[in-house]
Amino acid sequence: MKTRILTVVVCLTCLTALAADWPQWRGPNRDGVSAETQLLSTWPTEGPTLVWQAKDLGEGYSTPAVVGDRIYMNSNEGMDDEYVMCLSARDAKQVWRTRIGKVGPNRGPQYPGARSTPTVDGALLYTLGSDGDLACVETETGEIRWSKNLQEEFGGKPGKWAYSESPLVDGDVVVCTPGGSEATLLALDKKTGEVAWKCPIAEGDEAAYASIIIVEGPGPKQYVQFLQKGLVGVDAKTGKFLWRYDRTAKGSPANIPTPVANDGLVYSATGRGGGGTVRLSADGDEVEAEQVYFDVKLPKSIGGAVLVDGHLYGTNSGGLMCVDFASGEIKWESRGVGAGSVLAADGRLYVHGENGDVALVEITPEAYNEKGQFTLPDQPDRGRAKAWTYPVIAGGKLYLRDFGTMWCYDISDNEDFGPTSSRPRR
């Protein structure tokens, strides 16, 4: 497969201490927050400088992971072949591509395609194909070290739209969600693929579409996941089931946004249900989850939410909103670019609208304050689908993918990141 590339600026960045990798789903801490600084605080009307645009990268919704000068993501060609691939961050040229399985069938409206974001852990990465093929792959060569099929080997039960989760690497294990009653959640030795523990949850929930996060107390360290019937917490060391909360899952055909947690509070949301937060409390190794608030108006779109300075920022069908995380009070709402996925960096929100528009918004609980907006050029034909892939920031660059097209924009406001000719200034 040949990739067509429009190169606008041939020289990309020299990474500095101000730059940060984006090695997994929603960034280093799985919270959608980037540590990068010295980024543009405003955009011109046409948007920031386009570095390159690449087409024919394959189908699917996989958000890229970016480490150093490499981009890793999943893609597919038709229904028979799903791949994990490595591209150069300098020009999007393919370095390698490895088949990991076939595309998982959809049982509802048809949105088939690759979904998982690879998790890069040093010389290895871990990715999950939409049909349940979990693979450990060498980042340098694309060679598969080991692989497991979650349905065939662990009785996995995916949702109607196949597997979408991005695996979590934590210490010596890689953790994922087969679903079903045999191993609802599963931890494997990351080097060998051998089972570390299985967590069979009595309800036998389907896997749904969110990804696991780490919650450090109260009580033991936990892995928290949003299954099809509700939010659950399990002991990270043993896989013991600890608690569940089902309110936000009621009436929802697809639980998609990854939970957000801080200081004993965990937020979950679904498009058909609403958003709600539970407070965790512990008595020894036993943990309980008690609802703090629930509201159908809270951020609940596929694009998730980010937590910055005690306030939650995310979208619903009405647009972007800011919510006090502790109380659930809505501070402001604005149409902006409508529903979309959200990333936070350097005092700004980066919103990739489901319609293909992109907005830069000041992070403040006072009011909606937009600092720039533009429409991505040469967008693909999505059919009934939407632009669901999340934005990524790494090395002073903003990466946006929509099916087989990817764009790289220079958003740095620092000469050390690269050439400044034609770069918009603040």
Image (cartoon, rainbow, N blue to C red):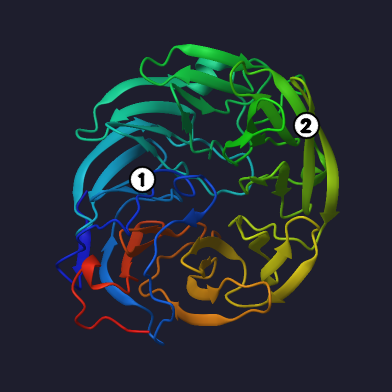
In front of the other: 15 or 80:
15
Mark 2, residue position: 244
| Tag 2 secondary structure | strand
Q: Which residue corresponds to the image point at 36% horizontal and 18% vertical from the top-left?
A: 191
Residues marked 2 and 1 touching at CB (< 8 Å) = no
Q: CA distance from mark 2 to mark 1?
A: 32 Å
- Residue 265 coordinates in the image, percent (x, y): 73, 44
Q: Residue furthest bottom?
A: 45
- Crowding at dot 1, Cα within 10 Å, few <14 / some 14-19 / many 20+, comes out as many
Number of the front mark, 2 or 1: 2
Q: Which residue corresponds to the image point at 72% horizontal and 64% vertical from the top-left?
A: 323
In front of the other: 82 or 324:
324
Quarter of the picture containing the C terminus is bottom left
- Residue 27 coordinates in the image, percent (x, y): 45, 49
Q: Which residue corresponds to the image point at 49% horizontal and 12% vertical from the top-left?
A: 195
Q: Amino acid at mark 1?
A: Met
Q: Is residue 420 left or right of residue 34?
A: left
- Tell me where residue 421 sits by quadrant: bottom left
Q: Is residue 381 left or right of residue 324?
A: left
The label shown at residue 12 is: none
Q: Is residue 421 above or below residue 201?
A: below
- Residue 239 coordinates in the image, percent (x, y): 63, 18
Q: Is residue 397 left or right of residue 189?
A: left
Mark 1, residue position: 73
Q: Is residue 91 left or right of residue 354?
A: left
| Tag 1 secondary structure | strand
Mark 2 and mark 1 lie on one chain; the one further toward the N terminus is 1
- Residue 60 coordinates in the image, percent (x, y): 43, 49
